[in-house]
């Protein structure tokens, strides 16, 4: 999604949900009014800014007509186009929100190297070079530096201060831009930024491929662009709305290129060559480079962002640890990917937050941050962390994240499907385990509805459809008598075995509503919230990486092994009358590609490699399976 806001077709950061919202909100009259306001108050210029290696990047600049005062520059770098092209064609909206265009900024939008109208070669999540690079060596940091240096020398009437912001891929460019930052770059807001494409963002979670997200994005965005162009049109017809059926019929992953891409999506084929955490992926890990950051930073993420929740949290944590003297603010709200940039942010799927969280963010957090740092207006009112606490549905302010005054508490998987704060007392592993079948030919659906995409609302979706399946284990507490406040990361420790030689392990933390929970007032679909099993957080771990992401190892059939991993942070209160539930399963389809359950390179697997398996989860004194969280 472009930083300026509004949703572009085919943009990775746009879910079907937000595309619908954008189309609904952009009625012809509203669009016409917005365009006329922009044209009447701003003048547009277009430049081809030279980089140090001679390549030129297409850049659109919108300058306030009122020259009575100077203005800061607000820069967005995007692979998703800074259109419309032509000095007589204007954007309908400028800035992260309407507040910015009314207040007055110089808005700059740039096509990154190799995309749309910019020269050069596009490299997906271009690796960051070392600080002692040669004079003509480039990365996204140097392209940002060269852009800012040109802008402050050639665009008149600025106040000498530059800010950057962007959501998703533009969030990555914002993060890269603040590394070895230009001295005029004062404030940055990476929002849902990509930080590591193998461990936790977008294409992979703990080495497991997010199949519909990767496939659909590359089917439209991954094609070659041989030369600068104003038009890139790559549509893909699945010929069905049913993603479960489509991706099951797709079969093993090599079929994606053989049947559909046919060699025209280079990055997909690159991904398929790198099934482990090798140098290809490590070079695209931005975390080691986020050090000695000088600009003020406000990292923004959504608790229900299916794409880059990991990136937002990791970006904040890395800057906090490596740049302790930097202003470093974290904002986490109850949003899907980019959900803070438009709409009210008061509901997701069937879950209501009873507050216009996105409006509050835009008015009380984002706009004041840039006004203070780029104009010196207002006060530095921000705490270390603005965090929306779901369940109680209130904003919390913390002086650290995770909160310092919380302590660790474990919840153990126990006999008879109980989730208990008491460690298991049983000692015999031969009888103290729970067992379930796992069949790649009949995987557990990740969502109880038909969708061809990675539906963003799955992050709060009802899990009753899964809890009723024989291939899903279910553990839950008794009815809670008091608020149970959980904040921070979820540490998972499982002791498991499989009859195969590899397996995925999916862990879901769920809020079970009381049976008398009221249904929504406006409820044409007849949704029943009594007993609703709301997903609070879920994630997957590819078992062969249990000891190393670099060097996978097979399981010995039926031999118990420990699997430990961390699920991204939450801030949720399980209210009195609710229950806490944990579900364990080995397929989550088509959200996660199918593990053949045999130890092979999954990206070159054959149909014959996919085998049924019997999974066991142990719960003894020496092999306790549990989740550990921070609680008050």
Image: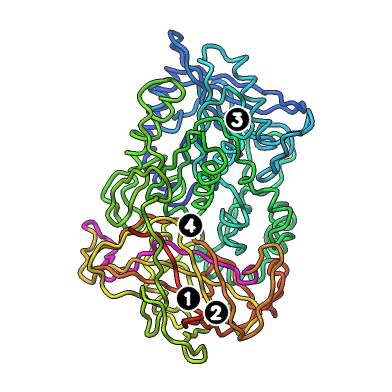
**Marks 4 and 3, how far apart at CA:** 32 Å
In the picture of the structure, the residue carrying the numbered disc 4 is: 568
Q: Which residue is mark 3?
A: 110
* Residue 154 percent location from the top left of the image: 62, 14
Q: How many marks?
A: 4
| Residue sitting farthest toward the top | 68
Which mark, by number, is residue 625? 1
Alpha carbon distance from label 1 to label 2: 8 Å
Tell which circle, 1 or 2, labels the residue nearer the N-terminal end. 2
Sooner in the amino-acid sequence: mark 2 or mark 4: 2
Q: Earlier in the sequence, mark 4 or mark 1?
A: 4
Which disc, if any, is residue 496?
A: 2
Q: Are marks 3 and 2 in contact (CB under 8 Å)?
A: no
Counting residues from the start of the chain, the first of labels 3 and 2 encountered is: 3
* x then y, percent, for residue 457: 41, 57
Query: From the viewer's perspective, is residue 451 above or below residue 217?
Result: below
Residue beneath the point at 51% across and 80% down:
623
What is the magenta range? 521-546
Q: Residues within 10 Å of mark 1 (few under 14, many from 20)?
A: many
Q: CA distance from mark 3 to mark 2?
A: 50 Å
Q: From what the image shows, is residue 337 above or below residue 528?
A: above
Task: State which mark lies toward you, 4 or 1.
Answer: 1
Disc nearest the viewer among 1 and 2: 1
Report whether residue 577 is seen: yes
Give the quadrant of the C terminus: bottom left
Q: Secondary structure at mark 4?
A: strand
- The residue sitting at 30% across, 62% down in the picture is 484
Q: Nearer the viewer, residue 114 or 322?
A: 322
Lower sequence index among marks 4 and 3: 3
Element carrying mark 2: strand
Q: Position of residue 294 (x, y in %)?
A: 56, 30
The residue at 46%/28% (across/down) is 94
């Amino acid at each position: 999604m472009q930083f300026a806001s509004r949703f572009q077709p085919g943009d990775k950061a746009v879910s079907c949900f937000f595309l619908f919202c954008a189309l609904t909100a952009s009625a012809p009259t509203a669009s016409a009014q917005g365009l006329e306001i922009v044209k009447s108050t701003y003048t547009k210029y277009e430049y081809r800014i030279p980089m140090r290696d001679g390549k030129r990047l297409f850049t659109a600049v919108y300058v306030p007509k009122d020259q009575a005062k100077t203005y800061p520059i607000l820069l967005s770098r995007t692979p998703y186009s800074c259109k419309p092209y032509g000095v007589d064609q204007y954007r309908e909206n400028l800035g992260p929100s309407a507040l910015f265009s009314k207040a007055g900024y110089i808005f700059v939008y740039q096509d990154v190297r190799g995309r749309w109208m910019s020269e050069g070669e596009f490299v997906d999540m271009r690796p960051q070079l070392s600080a002692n690079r040669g004079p003509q060596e480039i990365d996204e940091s140097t392209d940002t530096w060269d852009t800012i240096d040109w802008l402050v020398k050639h665009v008149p009437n600025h106040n000498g201060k530059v800010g950057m912001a962007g959501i998703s891929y533009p969030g990555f460019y914002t993060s890269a831009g603040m590394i070895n930052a230009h001295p005029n770059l004062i404030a940055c807001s990476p929002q849902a930024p990509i930080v590591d494409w193998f461990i936790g963002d977008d294409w992979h979670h703990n080495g497991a491929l997010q199949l519909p997200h990767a496939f659909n994005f590359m089917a439209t965005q991954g094609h070659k662009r041989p030369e600068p162009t104003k038009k890139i049109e790559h549509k893909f017809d699945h010929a069905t709305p049913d993603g479960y059926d489509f991706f099951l019929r797709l079969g093993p992953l090599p079929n994606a290129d053989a049947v559909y891409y046919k060699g025209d999506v280079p990055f997909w084929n690159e991904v398929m060559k790198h099934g482990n955490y090798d140098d290809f992926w490590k070079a695209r890990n931005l975390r080691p480079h986020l050090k000695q950051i000088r600009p003020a930073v406000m990292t923004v993420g959504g608790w229900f962002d299916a794409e880059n929740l990991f990136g937002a949290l990791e970006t904040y944590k890395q800057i906090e640890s490596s740049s302790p003297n930097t202003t470093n603010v974290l904002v986490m709200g109850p949003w899907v990917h980019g959900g803070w940039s438009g709409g009210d942010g008061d509901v997701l799927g069937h879950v209501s937050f009873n507050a216009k969280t996105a409006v509050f963010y835009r008015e009380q957090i984002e706009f004041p941050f840039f006004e203070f740092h780029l104009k010196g207006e207002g006060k530095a009112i921000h705490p270390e962390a603005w965090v929306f606490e779901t369940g109680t549905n209130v904003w919390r302010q913390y002086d650290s994240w995770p909160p310092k005054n919380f302590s660790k508490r474990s919840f153990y998987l126990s006999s008879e499907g109980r989730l208990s704060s008491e460690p298991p007392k049983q000692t015999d592993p031969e009888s103290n385990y729970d067992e379930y079948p796992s069949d790649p030919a009949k995987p557990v659906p990740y969502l109880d509805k038909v969708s061809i995409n990675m539906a963003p609302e799955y992050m709060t979706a009802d899990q009753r459809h899964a809890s009723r399946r024989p291939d899903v284990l279910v553990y839950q507490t008794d009815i809670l008598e008091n608020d149970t406040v959980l904040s921070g990361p979820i540490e998972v420790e499982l002791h498991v075995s499989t009859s195969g030689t590899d397996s995925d392990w999916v862990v879901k933390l769920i809020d079970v509503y009381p049976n008398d929970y009221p249904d929504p007032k406006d409820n044409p679909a007849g949704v029943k919230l009594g007993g609703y099993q709301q997903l609070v957080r879920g994630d997957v771990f590819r078992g062969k990486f249990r000891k190393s992401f670099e060097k996978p190892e097979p399981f010995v059939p039926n031999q118990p092994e420990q699997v430990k991993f961390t699920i991204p942070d939450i801030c949720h209160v399980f209210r009195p009358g609710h229950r806490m539930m944990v579900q364990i399963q080995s397929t989550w389809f088509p959200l996660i590609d199918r593990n053949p359950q045999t130890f092979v390179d999954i990206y070159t697997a054959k149909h014959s490699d996919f085998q049924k398996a019997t999974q066991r989860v142990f719960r003894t004194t020496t092999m306790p399976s549990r989740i550990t969280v921070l609680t008050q």
